Amino acid sequence: MEANTRSTGRLPAAFLTPGSSSFMDFLSDQSPEMLPGNRSLPPLQGAIEAPHGTTIVAASFPGGVVLAGDRRATMGNMIAQRDIEKVFPADEYSAVGIAGTAGLAVEMVKLFQLELEHFEKVEGAQLSLEGKANRLSTMIRSNLAMAMQGLAVVPLFAGYDVDREKGRIFSYDVTGGRSEETGYASTGSGSIFARNAMKKLYREDLTEEQALTLVVQALYDAADDDSATGGPDVARRIYPIITVITDEGFRRLGDQESADIARSILERRLEQPDGPRAALL
């Protein structure tokens, strides 16, 4: 459908007619070719080289949840970008961290943001956190054809559940399968190393400050063993993106706040290279 608004100055009737609260359903009816999953794919000619985002971590604490990501994007064995953005707000009380094919992942996040905004405008209320997690699962499943060609998107979704009054974390696989994680989670190439770090350091009674330190510590450990994960880069002043979601909503830490946390961990590592637990004490 082509919207010719220059001659009349008015939107087509489809945009003014009450319909589904799902923006994806509306787009599927009006312009299905714009959905990522409906695009025709070229014949498979081997592996497709595209920038990939790597490690995302999340940890909950009494009162909310922390979601963070490193800044490196890779393309094969090359560093494609050193300061990529991997963590985005989905709405006021939730956020998405992306791992996998960077271009498709960013496009999926933008579509997910529109989906949640459209629902709120049509229904006059926010979708529940469980509903948001399910909508994201459907979007990942629609990307399965591209995932089979190596263009997978595997995000980590976290948010504050206003009904249950606590932070929650959801992880996904390439087919859209959804799992709710308890306490902490990670995804991406360095996820196994980040998870091992959090497994040793996580406690249910962490303060917000300790949870922030925990996720940066996990990213540091992931970067130590995974070449695709970028650690804090003091020389270039590139530090992890760190976000907090509580009953007050989404908040992204400023560059100076992220730098202070990263520097404190680096300093303690220099004092005790084999003592990661000291970073939380």
Image (cartoon, grey):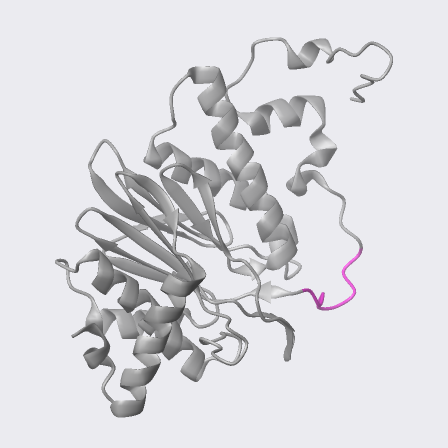
Q: Can you see residue 273?
A: no
Q: Nearer the viewer, residue 235 or 173?
A: 235
Magenta stretch secondary structure, dominant: loop
Q: Which residues are magenta?
A: 43-50
Q: Position of residue 5 (x, y in %)?
A: 80, 16
| Up-down relation of residue 254 to residue 271 (above or below) | above
Q: Quadrant of residue 281?
A: bottom left
> What residue appears at the point 45 percent right and 23 percent down from the top-left corner?
120
Q: Can you see residue 47?
A: yes
Residue projecting furthest to the right = 7
> What residue appears at the point 63 percent right and 62 percent down from the top-left corner?
150
Q: Nearer the viewer, residue 271 or 132?
A: 271
Q: Position of residue 268 (x, y in %)?
A: 27, 84
Q: Quadrant of residue 246?
A: top left
> What residue appears at the point 72 percent right and 27 percent down from the top-left corner?
31
Q: Position of residue 139 (x, y in %)?
A: 53, 40
